[in-house]
Amino acid sequence: MMKKTYKLENLECAVCGQMIEDAIRKLDGVQEVHVSFISQRLTLVAEDAAFEGVLQAAQKICRKTEPDCRIVL
């Protein structure tokens, strides 16, 4: 398992943060995910082999949910 925390830019809505978290949680390989609107952070725990793909999918989910939101790598 790999666990990483990333900064979120331009997450302007707590409800959007929850929607992003819920969508990422459904991705294959995700063990745990937490989006904090207050600290503007995304914490992701996923299988090592799937981590990069999960992160790319999470980026797309962020942009789809809130177009200006992005994960800072």
Image (cartoon, rainbow, N blue to C red):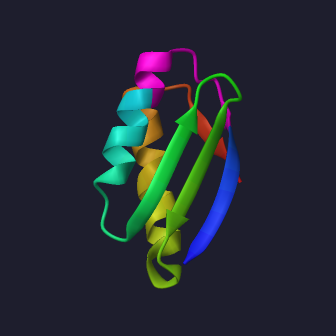
The reply to whether residue 58 is in sight is yes
- Furthest-top residue in view? 13
- State yes or no: residue 13 in magenta: yes
Where 4 sits versus 58, above or below? below
Q: Magenta residues, as a range?
A: 8-17
Query: In percent of the image, x 66 and y 61: which residue is there?
Result: 4
Query: In percent of the image, x 47 and y 28: which residue is there?
Result: 17
Q: Position of residue 19 (x, y in %)?
A: 36, 30
- State yes or no: residue 56 in magenta: no
Q: Nearer the viewer, residue 30 or 73?
A: 30
Point out the image quarter for the N terminus: bottom right
Q: Position of residue 41 (x, y in %)?
A: 66, 38
Could you tell whether 25 is left or right of 49 in the image? left
Picture quadrant of residue 72: top right
- Furthest-bottom residue in view? 49
Q: Nearer the viewer, residue 31 or 49?
A: 31
Where 42 sits versus 53, above or below? above
